[in-house]
Image (cartoon, rainbow, N blue to C red):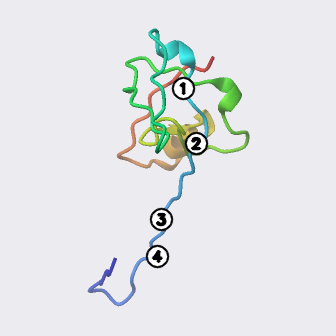
Amino acid sequence: MDLSFRGKFAPELLEVELHPHGRLHDSCFPGGRERPCERCGRQGDGLPDAPILDGSTLPAGQDLFRLADFTTVIIATERFADAVTRLGLEGVVFKEVPVA
């Protein structure tokens, strides 16, 4: 992407890379999970209304990551949420998700 800035000093821009780790617990899917596509491995399950994280699949020592089975879902630790609040950052909404 080409960006240009009118000011004398361009701000430093950083891109956050969030790797996929962790999965939702199987209990979120009462009828069972859909079988993955044999070609690409994608599962067609929709995001449950009440997601529960599978604690055995969560990474240790990472405060921010995506779920491996729902890559559009970003998970933050309580420590990360506290830091955002302490710094007064705006535009971020956190929702507590249980872990099983």
Q: Residues within 10 Å of mark 2 (few under 14, many from 20)?
A: some
Residue 26 on image: x %, y %: 55, 18
Residue, disc 3: 15
Of the two numbered discs 4 and 1 on the same chain, state the one appearing first in sequence: 4
- Secondary structure state at the residue bearing disc 4: loop
In percent of the image, x 30 and y 83: which residue is there? 5
Q: Is 16 drawn above or below residue 71 in the view shown?
A: below
Give the residue type that dot 4 points to: Glu
Residue 84 on image: x %, y %: 51, 45
Give the residue type that dot 1 points to: Leu
Q: Nearer the viewer, residue 37 or 51?
A: 37
In percent of the image, x 46 and y 76: which residue is there? 12
Residue 55 on image: x %, y %: 66, 25
Q: Nearer the viewer, mark 3 or mark 4?
A: 3
Q: Is 98 drawn above or below residue 75 in the view shown?
A: above
Q: Nearer the viewer, mark 4 or mark 1?
A: 1
Of the two numbered discs 3 and 2 on the same chain, state the one appearing first in sequence: 3
Residue, disc 4: 12
Of the two numbered discs 1 and 3 on the same chain, state the one appearing first in sequence: 3
In percent of the image, x 61 and y 41: which residue is there? 21
Q: Determine whether label 1 and label 2 are within 8 Å by CB.
A: no
* Distance of label 1 from label 2 (alpha carbons): 20 Å
Quadrant housing the C terminus: top right
